[in-house]
Amino acid sequence: VQLVESGGGLAQPGGSLGLSCAASGFNFRSYDMAWFRQAPGKEREFVAAIRKYGGATYYADSVKGRFTISRNNNKSTLSLQMNNLKPENTAVYYCAAASSTITSTLGRARSYTYWGQGTQVTVSS
């Protein structure tokens, strides 16, 4: 199983970045997928999730209206479009996969089985 994130980098406040996660080694379309992030000295926190069936999406309050999660089941890829970036969005961003989640727990890191290595996002002027 592999989850490989890409697309991180440096962005200015108010700018945009798009992250991708390429999945392999498991049946991607049968997994709920999510993005988490971890800033230095802080715990890993939920950013966004997308269901395996129907594609329902969920977001942390701090990113609603600015970030968009999407998936392409034919290509086994997960994406996160981040707009109007803020310095506090600086973190390592991880994609994660879970065979099944319930709404009350999809924001918990322990609900996810597979994790990528992460990609650094830095927002600074």
Image: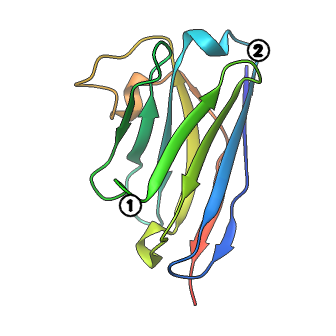
| Residue located at (54% from left, 59% from top) | 82
Q: Quadrant of the C terminus?
A: bottom right
2 on left or right of 92: right
The percent position of residue 32, horizontal first and vertical second, equals 49, 20
Query: Is residue 48 shown above or below 74?
Result: below
For the point 69% across and 60% down, which residue is it?
Answer: 8
79 over 13 or under it: above or below: above
Q: How many marks?
A: 2
Q: What label does residue 80 carry, if any?
A: none
Horizontal and vertical percent position of residue 31: 54, 15
Whether residues under marks 2 and 1 lie with C-beta atoms below 8 angstroms apart, the answer is: no
Residue 89 position (above or below residue 117): below
Give the mark, 2 or 1, whose residue is nearer the N terminus.
Answer: 2
The residue pinned by badge 1 equals 42
**Circle 2 residues within 10 Å: few <14, some 14–19, many ≥20:** few
Mark 2 to mark 1 CA distance (whole Å): 30 Å
The residue sitting at 45% across, 75% down in the picture is: 86
Q: Secondary structure at mark 2?
A: loop
**Residue tagged 2:** 25
Where's residue 67, x and y in %?
Answer: 46, 54
Instruction: Please rate how many residues cluster around mark 1, counting C-alpha atoms within 10 Å: few if below 14, some from 14 to 19, many from 20.
Output: few
- Give the amino acid type for the residue marked by disc 2 in the picture: Gly
The residue nearer to you, when weighing 124 against 77, is: 77
Q: Amino acid at mark 1?
A: Lys
Q: Is residue 6 left or right of residue 13?
A: right
Quadrant for residue 106, please give it.
top left
Q: Residue at x 59, y 82 (%)?
A: 12
Q: Quadrant of the N terminus?
A: top right
Q: Of tags 2 and 1, which is closer to the observer?
A: 2
| Element type where label 1 sits in the image | loop
- The picture places residue 40, in percent across and down from the top left corner, at 48, 66
Question: Does 84 appear above or below 69?
Answer: below
